[in-house]
């Protein structure tokens, strides 16, 4: 975005990639909306778990003339080393690309074994990807990922209802935690991508908002995540044009004040408490029960972004992924 008061582009940690502060996931909006978002300055495009054909079509079209502007992330969940490269190659064919800017190793609550990492490195050496990123649901494990120069970025759950990364992840980023544009300190630590900013819509649900508190807008949820100095990108899974436009409004509105952050924390705490007993989303209810039972830093259940794609589900079972359809 070109505004001076809002969120400016950032350097995605060790990758050195210049990225928009909002990223767009492949699970919802149509081709026209994806292309419009890129015209507004969004350049971080995430080919994740739910892979809509329209999103792929938008990437293919944009890449013909604007590939250098885009930062394309391809995710794989495969636990079979021999299938890491085929999984990436299937994704690249669907996107009409010869390489991904980032290969995301998805949902590793413990560090991947050497065979997986070697396979991922070979993908990079072959020119199929430029950098590696990893996601995880055990916050305590992130300390090891942060210290490992293998990873140019990490992907972590962070929102007003789940702020635990503030105490258990972000402090381990060290002196490089504060973003510094294209400065040297940004390269000393991995980039940070935050997801589930709206907590699957629960932070926008008036039924769950504590009495006496106003309900946040979608852009408030993204502003909350992006205001933390450790966060480079907030991932957006907009499903409609209106949701996308509201998310992008966060970039114009800019960082939250201390008063706004305190309000969001109150709302988040209330939403999480209310969700345990009356959430309309059974998945959120189960997630709350699991995370509460495990305690701080314990295993968190899979997020919606961690729902396996068909090709990765087959790859994990050792089924060849060639010839898969969207």
Image: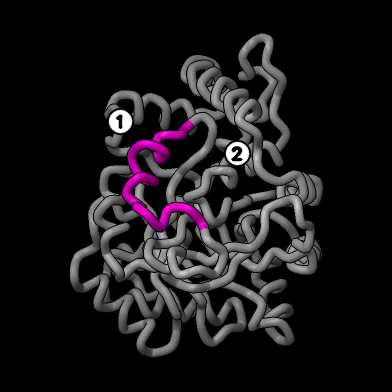
Magenta run includes residue 167: yes
Q: Residue at x 77, y 50 (%)?
A: 252
Name the residue: 73% across, 79% down.
Answer: 61
Position of residue 141 relative to residue 290, above or below, is below
Q: Is residue 150 visible?
A: yes
- Regarding residue 312, the answer to whether it shows in the image is no
Q: What quarter of the picture does the C terminus occupy?
A: bottom right
Residue 166 located left or right of residue 40: left
Q: Secondary structure at mark 2?
A: helix
- What residue did someone put label 1 on? 296
- Label 2 vs 1, first from the N-terminus: 2
Is 230 positioned to the left or the right of 255 in the image? left
Residue 151's x, y, as percent?
A: 35, 67
Magenta segment = 162-179
Where is residue 202? Give x, y as percent: 60, 29
Residue identifier under label 2:
224
- In the image, 258: left or right of 115? right
The image position of residue 286, as x and y in percent, is 42, 29
Q: Distance between the Cα atoms at labels 2 and 1?
A: 21 Å
Main structural element of the magenta stretch: helix, strand or loop?
helix
Q: Is residue 12 magenta?
A: no
């Amino acid at each position: 975005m070109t505004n001076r008061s809002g969120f400016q582009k950032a350097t995605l940690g060790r990758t050195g990639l210049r990225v928009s502060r909002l990223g767009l996931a492949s699970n919802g909006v149509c081709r026209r909306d994806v292309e419009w978002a890129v015209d507004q300055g969004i350049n971080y495009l995430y080919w994740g778990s739910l892979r809509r054909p329209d999103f792929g079509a938008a990437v293919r079209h944009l890449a013909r003339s604007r590939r250098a502007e885009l930062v394309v992330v391809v995710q794989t969940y495969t636990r079979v080393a021999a299938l890491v490269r085929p999984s990436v190659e299937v994704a690249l064919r669907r996107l009409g690309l010869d390489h991904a800017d980032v290969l995301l190793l998805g949902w590793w609550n413990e560090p991947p074994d050497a065979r997986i990492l070697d396979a991922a490195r070979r993908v990079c050496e072959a020119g199929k990807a430029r950098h590696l990123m990893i996601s995880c649901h055990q916050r305590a494990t992130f300390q090891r990922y942060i210290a490992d120069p293998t990873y140019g970025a990490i992907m972590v759950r962070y929102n007003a209802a789940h702020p635990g990364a503030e105490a258990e992840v972000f402090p381990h980023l060290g002196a490089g935690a504060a973003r510094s544009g294209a400065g040297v300190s940004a390269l000393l630590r991995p980039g940070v991508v935050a997801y589930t900013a709206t907590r699957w819509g629960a932070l926008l649900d008036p039924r769950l908002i504590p009495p006496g508190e106003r309900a946040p807008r979608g852009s408030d949820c993204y502003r909350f995540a992006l205001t933390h100095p450790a966060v480079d990108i907030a991932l957006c899974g907009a499903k409609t044009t209106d949701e996308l436009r509201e998310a992008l409004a966060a970039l114009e509105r800019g960082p939250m004040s201390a008063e706004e952050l305190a309000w969001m924390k109150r709302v988040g705490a209330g939403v999480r408490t209310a969700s345990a007993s009356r959430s309309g989303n059974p998945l959120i209810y189960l997630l709350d029960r699991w995370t509460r039972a495990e305690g701080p830093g314990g295993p968190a259940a899979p997020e919606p972004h961690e729902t396996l794609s068909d090709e990765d589900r087959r790859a994990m079972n050792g089924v060849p992924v060639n010839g898969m359809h969207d």
